[in-house]
Image (tube, rainbow, N blue to C red):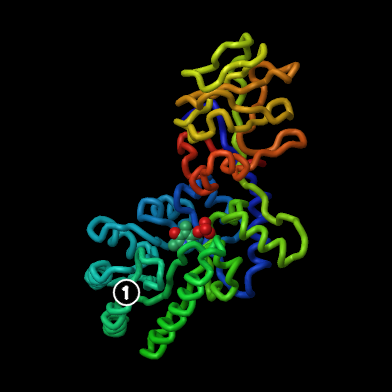
């Protein structure tokens, strides 16, 4: 574990977000909390605990390793669903034994699940993912008859719990027609399943952006990642929300803060270069502070010369390149800055704020990418 910085998670902010989402979505829509990517960098272990406190009862992950980590926290208090990778050889046994639900988009996964379910005499709980236009995973239309026959024939061992799909970029209006076509295609396929006497318990398709931009995609369950952490999928989705509400008030609150401290302070003379190479030259006599955080911890190199941090209640600029374990900050204007002063990389200090999106604007990194790059070795602390 590093002790040069820490991430603080605020359960009150989480409550604000989940309360908003529950109120905003149609009545009865189940929220699945998406915690892939180490809970978008928040840490599965800590974040899932916070979500459970707010009675979240469904979690979605990418792979079986994440499923194991979530299961260790939730035990029997919530459902866990794998949306992507699992190994038919090493994982399926554990998955079926523990009632872990999983996406199926391949015949081989379905036949492997059947064989194991028969062997251990326990039903496999599956969500059939269908191709609607993203062209990533999902059964193609030519395979659907095979899937339907299989599900009908093997209902004793395979529980057809969900019919699902995923949209190809609902956060951008540029994809409007593509998404609309996907919605229509999903509805057709759903009807086709029902006509065969195969009605899934849950229809689900929406991520955060789809659930907000295309309310009809909320169906029975929504798979919500980014918004529960307090971020909007894109500025467009936020502006669209403002327009609909006719006011500019962001109902979401950032759950995560990232804090470190000043490691050293010193002076640099006019005309000197700061750090590696020549990317920054002091054009006046300056005071600089070193902060022990760098790209090894998840503070991207693309923030060289552009990143901002808060020190002594003021917004200060990163100068020179971000190093592996360090960055240099211009603190010329801070009179009293000294070693051990708090440095906020994401979060609030006095009346100022630094959001993840404000620094991803500088670096063209999406919120998603920046969050998931936060090193798992940075301690996560739950704010009390
Ligand atoms: C990541 C993911 C989501 C959640 O997306 P957000 O934009 O973070 O809400 C939903 N469904 C699938 C299949 C995903 O991979």
Instruction: Establish if 287 lies above or below 95.
Output: above
Instruction: Establish if 133 lies above or below 196.
Output: above
- Front residue of 148/305: it is 305
Q: Position of residue 93 (x, y in %)?
A: 28, 61
Q: Position of residue 361 (x, y in %)?
A: 59, 43
Instruction: State yes or no: Cβ of the residue under disc 1 lies below 8 Å from any atom of ligand 1.
Output: no
Instruction: Establish if 170 lies above or below 156.
Output: above
Q: Quadrant of residue 102?
A: bottom left
- Front residue of 365/101: it is 365
Q: Position of residue 377 (x, y in %)?
A: 46, 34
Task: Tell me if residue 209 can be seen.
Answer: yes
Q: Secondary structure at mark 1?
A: loop
Which residue position is annotated with label 1? 140
Instruction: Establish if 364 lies above or below 141.
Output: above
* Residue found at x 49% / y 39%: 374
Position of residue 13 in the picture relative to residue 162 (left or right): right
* Residue found at x 31% / y 82%: 148
* Quadrant location of the C terminus in the rendered image: top right
Q: Position of residue 53 (x, y in %)?
A: 60, 55
Q: Quadrant of residue 25?
A: bottom right
* Residue found at x 77% / y 60%: 247
């Amino acid at each position: 574990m590093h002790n040069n910085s820490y991430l603080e998670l605020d359960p009150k902010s989480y409550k604000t977000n989940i309360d908003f989402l529950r109120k905003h979505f149609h009545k009865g829509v189940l929220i699945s909390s998406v915690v892939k990517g180490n809970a978008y960098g928040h840490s599965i272990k800590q974040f899932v605990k916070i979500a459970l406190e707010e009675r979240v009862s469904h979690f979605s992950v990418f792979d079986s390793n994440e499923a194991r980590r979530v299961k260790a926290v939730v035990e029997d208090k919530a459902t866990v669903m794998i949306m992507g990778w699992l190994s038919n050889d090493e994982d399926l046994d554990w998955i079926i034994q523990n009632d872990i639900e999983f996406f199926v988009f391949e015949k081989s996964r379905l036949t492997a699940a059947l064989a194991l379910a028969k062997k251990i005499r326990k039903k496999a709980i599956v969500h059939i993912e269908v191709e609607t236009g993203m062209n990533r995973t999902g059964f193609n239309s030519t395979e659907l008859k095979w899937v339907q026959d299989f599900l009908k024939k093997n209902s004793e061992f395979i529980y057809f719990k969900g019919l699902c799909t995923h949209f190809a970029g609902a956060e951008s209006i540029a994809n409007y027609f593509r998404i609309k076509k996907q919605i229509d295609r999903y509805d057709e396929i759903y009807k086709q399943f029902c006509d065969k006497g195969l009605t899934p318990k849950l229809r689900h398709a929406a991520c955060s952006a789809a659930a907000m931009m295309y309310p009809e995609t909320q169906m029975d369950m929504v798979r919500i990642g980014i918004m529960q952490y307090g971020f909007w999928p894109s500025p467009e989705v936020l502006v669209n929300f403002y327009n609909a509400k006719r006011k500019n008030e962001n109902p979401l609150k950032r759950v995560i803060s990232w804090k470190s401290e000043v490691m050293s302070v010193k002076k640099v003379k006019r005309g000197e270069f700061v750090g590696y190479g020549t990317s920054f030259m002091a054009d006046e006599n300056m005071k600089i502070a070193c902060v022990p955080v760098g790209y090894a911890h998840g503070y991207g190199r693309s923030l060289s010369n552009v990143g901002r941090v808060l020190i002594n209640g003021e917004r200060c600029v990163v100068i020179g390149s971000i190093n592996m374990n360090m960055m240099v900050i211009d603190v010329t204007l801070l009179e009293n800055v000294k070693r051990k002063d708090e440095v906020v990389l994401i979060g609030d200090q006095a009346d100022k704020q630094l959001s993840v999106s404000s620094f991803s604007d500088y670096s063209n990194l999406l919120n998603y990418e920046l969050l998931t790059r936060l090193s798992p070795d940075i301690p996560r602390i739950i704010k009390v």
